[in-house]
Image: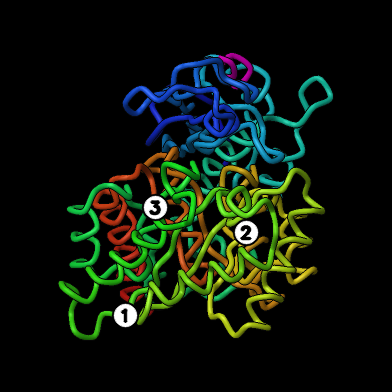
Amino acid sequence: MKIKDVVCASGRSGYMHRDLAAIKSGKAKPNGSLYEGAPLSPGFTRIIEPASIVSVMLLLEDGQVAFGDCADVILAGVAGRDPAFNAEGHIDYLRTEVADALRGLDVARFRANAERMDAFRRGGERLHTAVRYGVSQALLHATALAHKKTMAEIIAAEYGSTISTQPIPILASCHKDDPGQLDRVILKRVELLPHASFQIVAEHVGLRGEKLAAFVRNVAKRCQEIGDPDYDPRIHVDLYGTLGELFSMQVEPLVDYLGRLREESAPYRLLVESPMIAKTQPEQIAKFRAMRDGLKTKGIDVGIIADEWCNTLEDIRLFAGAGASDFVQIKTPDLGSIHNTIEAVLYCKQAGMGACLGGTANETDHSTRISCHMGLACQPDFMLSKPGLGADEALMIQTNEMARTLALLAHRNG
């Protein structure tokens, strides 16, 4: 089965772009959910701006249409990431140069096609990670259509992995200031919660860490108040480097504070993502390793998750090799082609490092469904809910896609 033609359409992402550098600079003035001031990160025209996607549709010889969505992360342009993606700046060459490279391609095998397009050069440069992400989704979808199989089956066959017989646990991504949303994910027995974003020290964490501590305490309390008697989630918070700022990048007081957070999360286990964001990758790895060593020495049971400065498959190998974190958030758009994400999850499992098949609220329903197939085929420890930050819609999309896939596979194998 070959690709007959390529059609592209611009569309909306599941969330927004946020210029983290500008927000943290102290110069941006809050205005509701916006910030007034000049953007600092590459690709931004405003500090907070709507994000767009390009849907790449592959018209196959038999009339079927495979597609993938080019999308990037909310916090684009920082910690080694590509500039913020916008459809207008990329759709023209997708319709011409990239389409020319795709037409006539035999979609019988996914992996070789994904690797080929991931290495595609334009003006001597690799394509934006968002473009490589979307094109590879379309190629996986095309191979599945050609073989009349699920995308999970295609991945498992080409990578020698075993498809899970159970849904992958989900980390619900919630707004920290929406207690109703928290209640709903507790009632739905989500396995990890609430991922809430803490980006500004004074406003979100507190100058003595009191606001973050109170938040963790309240989440644990609410789980006990309204959760089923046997409900035992893990509490997760995404800190965007704020503890590094609060403690001037000093590891020991930061570790002591994590011990305080662990007490607040009791009786539930605690995971913290990006407690520090260093200025360079080597420093990030060194600080994370020191944090893990400090937690172990003090007997503090807190799991550390790496995100920033751990963007590519090569980065993940560096963090794993250094023992720098308990888990890595494999942020799908940052890895470009999804074959890199597949290899990253499988590598983490082989290396004994925890894997979160992550991504961003800034993705789409379609890229989310494809991530579910990657999850079932590669079996990460858990998945991040996406798209959007509404939690309910994301949980619905992911839960139902996994349920449908598992039911189909059980029927075929039954």
- Tell me the residue at 38%/27% (across/down): 12
Please identify the quarter of the rendering in which residue 186 is found. bottom left
Q: Main secondary structure of the magenta part?
A: helix
Is-magenta flag for residue 91? yes
**Relative side of 208 to 188, left or right:** right
- Tell me the residue at 68%/45% (across/down): 113
Query: What is the distance, in whole Å, between disc 3 and disc 2 at their CAs?
Result: 16 Å
Q: Position of residue 141 (x, y in %)?
A: 49, 47
Label 1: state its secondary structure.
Answer: loop
Q: Position of residue 247 (x, y in %)?
A: 62, 55
- Residue 395 in view, yes or no: yes
**Which residue has dot 3 on it?**
196
Query: What's under tag 1, amino acid-wise?
Result: Asp
Query: Of marks 3 and 2, which one's residue comes earlier in the chain?
Result: 3
Query: What is the distance, in whole Å, between disc 1 and disc 3 at their CAs?
Result: 18 Å
Contact (CB < 8 A) between labels 1 and 3? no
Q: Residue furthest front?
A: 208
**Which residue has dot 1 on it?**
232
User: Is 62 placed above or below 183 here?
Assistant: above
Q: Nearer the viewer, mark 1 or mark 3?
A: 3
Is-magenta flag for residue 184? no
Label 2: state its secondary structure.
Answer: strand
Query: What's under tag 3, amino acid-wise?
Result: Ala
Q: Quadrant of the N terminus?
A: top right
Query: Of marks 1 and 3, which one's residue comes earlier in the chain?
Result: 3
**Which residue has dot 2 on it?**
306
- The total of numbered circles placed on residues is 3
* Magenta residue span: 89-94
Residue 11 vs residue 292, the one in the foreground: 292
Q: Position of residue 217 (x, y in %)?
A: 33, 67
